Amino acid sequence: MPSRSWFSKALLPWYTGNKRDLPWRNTADPYRIWLSEVILQQTRVDQGLAYWQRFVRRWPAIADLAAASEDEVLKEWQGLGYYSRARNLRVGALQVIQEHEGTFPRSHAGLLKLKGVGDYTAAAIASICFDQAEAVVDGNVYRVLSRVFGIVTPIDSSEGKRVFKMLASELLSKEHPGDHNQAVMELGATVCTPRNPDCTACPLLGLCIAQKEGRIALLPVKSKKQVVRIRHFNYLVIPSAKGLWMRQRKGKDIWQGLWELPMLETERSATSSVLLELVRKSLRTTSAAPWSVKKTGLPVEHLLSHQRIIATFWACEPVGQWRSPDEWKMVSPKELKKLAVHRLMERWMEKA
Ligand code: SF4
């Protein structure tokens, strides 16, 4: 097979001259690199930078993060979504402290044993921090490679995952694996973007099959259509002189561990009589007179990767005796600011 060293030969000098100056590029500390990789799986660099800076200011070393509580980490992560990543970060930090005497494993296989670290993150840490020849494959890499090599194998198929991983490993510079990996991702993030890539600024112009054949918009190929689940959340805004009733989400559902207003989920958009019946059952109200419930404004849509949440906020006026469920908590305005809430709740709080 002819050598494909032309790929890294074109890419590495471009990376040296064009990479963005980001704080995690000036360190080989695996804790800080790990943090940046996990944050950047959630958001763009401009937003992720502020989160990264806040994390390293508050928890400068991995031992500091390991000593933090889950609530503290979730609060700092607030707004990024996919909160299991934040929980895993903390558990992974504990593993490094307790099982590896505070030193990160250097091998890809060792890194994979840390909670929440998958193939991508393990390859990124191993190559950037320890010069291991492990190729990363993320969305940017799929896009760049599928276009440069004109590959039509769907990236969300098991065959696609195998093909792209093999190609990325074959192309990887064995002398500079960390820079090579970062260069492909940087090209995908800044030049070979999903829409309107800036081909004139690309070091691979002239070598890129999609560009030569006018197939840029067709690549990469995805096979599956994502099924989106629609859910109706009814939030209860129950006024009190002391503050606001809130509850912490438990169980295996979305937003685990985060706080929100008390919520009743319905199959479809609820009428006030349906909601009243639910309130009566769940709060064991004793008064014959029903509560008054009134929709406040239009329902709010909130999109997650596989779910569309339609949230209705109900102003409730309790009548007679009622018992709040055990998981509810009366929260003062001061305490409210300290709670980790999900983005939908944050949007409501900003408005309210
Ligand atoms: S030439 Fe254009 S499409 Fe091809 S890799 Fe470069 S930016 Fe992407």
Image (spheres, helix red, strand yellow):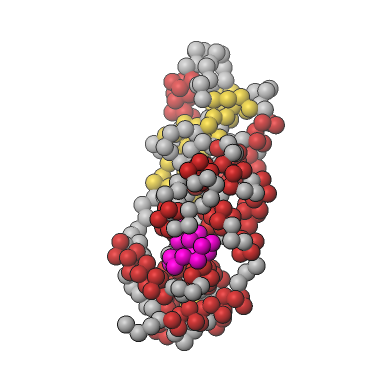
Q: Residue at x 57, y 29 (%)?
A: 246
Name the chief secondary structure element in magenta.
Answer: helix
Queried whether the magenta region covers residue 14, the answer comes back as no
Q: In front: 158, or 352?
A: 158
Above or below, 192 against 87 in this view is: below
Point 56% across, 35% down: residue: 259
Image coordinates of residue 290 in percent, x first then y, are 51, 19
- Residue lying at 45% horizontally and 83% vertically, measured from the top left: 6
The residue drawn where x is 58% and y is 47% is 62
Q: Quadrant of the C terminus?
A: top right
Residue 130 on the magenta segment: yes
Q: Quadrant of residue 13?
A: bottom right
Q: Where does the image place residue 189, in percent across and percent down from the top left?
A: 53, 68
Residue 211 vs 176, above or below: the answer is below
Q: Position of residue 102 (x, y in %)?
A: 55, 47
Q: Residue furthest right?
A: 334
Q: Please report the bounds of the magenta region as a residue range.
A: 121-135
Say above or below: 160 vs 38.
below
The quadrant the N terminus occupies is bottom left
Residue 92 visible: no
24, 340: nearer the viewer: 24
Q: Tell which of 96 and 191 is nearer to you.
A: 96
Q: Residue furthest front?
A: 101
Q: Is residue 135 visible?
A: yes
